[in-house]
Image (cartoon, rainbow, N blue to C red):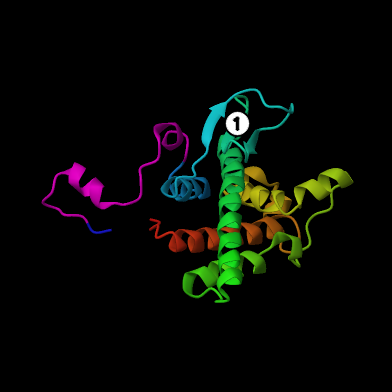
Amino acid sequence: MPTNALAPPPVNRLLDKTPQLPTEWSKILAPNSAAYETAVILNATGQLPKISFTKLSESGRAGEYDRESNSININPNSKDLSTTLAHELTHALRHAMENKVRGIGAMAEQTGVPPTGIDKQLFDAWYKLDPDTTKLKPLNYPDAKYQNYRFSFSEAPAFAVGRMDNPQKNLSREQYYMTNPGGSHYDATLATEQALLRALYAKQNNIKLK
């Protein structure tokens, strides 16, 4: 958004309709990251979760998002905070987007008028990019229970965004350079799809992303 070069900084800040991130978030998020962009969108729509660093309900977990309280708990001993934040914030944003899409669908059903414009774009994209219907082939894990969890509707996109925020750090060399379906190809594609959904949701809410 253009600023008035003759106005003092506080006035220019008022021209930006996107609320500043709370300190507890801005100090731990890297600018230009997927996690930062997600937090900006959630904050601008009044849906940014509360964050705390505390012992989690299950040992070994790096973080968890609770829908009921709209809060994120992070394991203080998490080895990769950036990946964990991107993962958990994606859960929060997908929950918000799902509610928005359901609302668009409910309104269309009640009025008999199909969605148009950005509402239609977001509505269509949400269902077209459903991870449950993707034709991509994920890697096979020996643990069937973990396999189902890792590539489920709610977890697959969150894992993808988290891992692809810094792929060289989160993937082995073989996975990072893999070109066949599966591995990094799966996560890279889903992460790109989530970026598209973030952009549509931001536009639908009149949020200008930098």
Q: Judge left or right: residue 27 versus residue 99.
A: left
Please give the name of the residue rendered at 31% of the width and 52% of the height, measured from the top-left corner.
17
Residue 95 horizontal/vertical position (percent): 60, 50
Quarter of the rendering occupied by the N terminus: bottom left
Front-most of residues 39 and 138: 39
Q: In which quarter of the view is residue 65 placed? A: top right
Most extreme residue toward the left is 6
Quarter of the rendering occupied by the C terminus: bottom left
SS assignment at label 1 = strand
Residue 109 horizontal/vertical position (percent): 61, 70
Magenta residues (range): 3-29
Q: Judge left or right: residue 151 versus residue 122.
A: right
Front-most of residues 145 and 78: 145
Residue 51 horizontal/vertical position (percent): 53, 32
Pointer 1: what residue?
A: 73
Name above or below for residue 101 compared with residue 72. Answer: below
Front-most of residues 70 and 145: 70
Front-most of residues 199 and 119: 119
Crowding at label 1, few (<14), some or many (≥20) Cα neighbours within 10 Å? many
Residue type at tag 1: Asn
Visible residue check, residue 181: no
Name above or below for residue 165 compared with residue 180. Answer: above
Most extreme residue toward the front is 110
Q: Judge left or right: residue 70 versus residue 142.
A: left
Please give the name of the residue rendered at 42% of the width and 37% of the height, measured from the top-left corner.
26
Please give the name of the residue rendered at 79% of the width and 62% of the height, measured from the top-left corner.
137
Visible residue check, residue 28: yes
Residue 117 horizontal/vertical position (percent): 47, 74
Q: In which quarter of the view is residue 80 placed? A: top right
User: Quick check: is 121 in the magenta stretch?
Assistant: no
Q: Judge left or right: residue 84 versus residue 143.
A: left
